[in-house]
Image: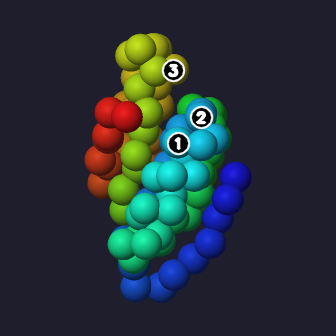
Amino acid sequence: MNTSVKNDAISVLIVEDEVIIALEIESRLRDRGFNIIGTVASSEDAVKTALTFRPDIIILKYIKFDLISLSTHHSIPSSASLKTTNALL
């Protein structure tokens, strides 16, 4: 997991299992001033990271609408009271 902190930027957690795509998303968002608090590849890491860092936005990849992604989508906001944005990648 890659993490860093900027004080005034909108914080973003990226959930993407393809490294090249994750790096591209991270680079583009950083260039636009977003604070990437983490890039994780699994649903389990997404939940742990979201609960620890409480990002403003979570970009969550749906993998063929699998049950793990759908479960993660529903469990993060309810357990952490987070604002969540989902993006289909």
Residue shown at the point (67%, 59%) measured from the top left: 2
- Rounded to the nearest whole Å, what is the CA distance between mark 1 and mark 3? 20 Å
Q: In which quarter of the image is residue 55?
A: bottom left
Residue 54 seen by the camera: no
Kind of element beneath mark 1: helix
What residue is disc 3 on? Answer: 68
**Which amino acid, by three-letter code, is at mark 3?**
Ile
Q: Where residue 3 appears, x then y in whole percent?
A: 64, 64
Dot placed on the residue nearer the N-terminal end, 3 or 2: 2
What residue is disc 2 on? Answer: 18
Kind of element beneath mark 2: loop
Kind of element beneath mark 3: helix
Local crowd size for mark 3, using a 10 Å CA cut-off: few (<14), some (14–19), many (≥20): some
Local crowd size for mark 1, using a 10 Å CA cut-off: few (<14), some (14–19), many (≥20): few
Q: Which colour scheme is used?
A: rainbow
Local crowd size for mark 2, using a 10 Å CA cut-off: few (<14), some (14–19), many (≥20): few
- Rounded to the nearest whole Å, what is the CA distance between mark 2 and mark 1? 6 Å
**Which amino acid, by three-letter code, is at mark 2?**
Glu
- Rounded to the nearest whole Å, what is the CA distance between mark 3 and mark 2? 16 Å
Q: Closer to the observer: label 1 or label 3? A: 1
Residue 19 is left or right of residue 27, and the answer is: right
Q: Where residue 20 appears, x then y in whole percent?
A: 60, 43
Looking at the image, do the residues carrying marks 2 and 1 touch, with CB atoms under 8 Å apart?
A: yes
Q: In which quarter of the image is residue 79?
A: top left
Q: Where residue 30 appears, x then y in whole percent?
A: 46, 69
Residue 59 seen by the camera: yes
What residue is disc 1 on? Answer: 21
Looking at the image, do the residues carrying marks 3 and 2 touch, with CB atoms under 8 Å apart?
A: no
| Quadrant the C terminus occupies | top left
**Which amino acid, by three-letter code, is at mark 1?**
Ile
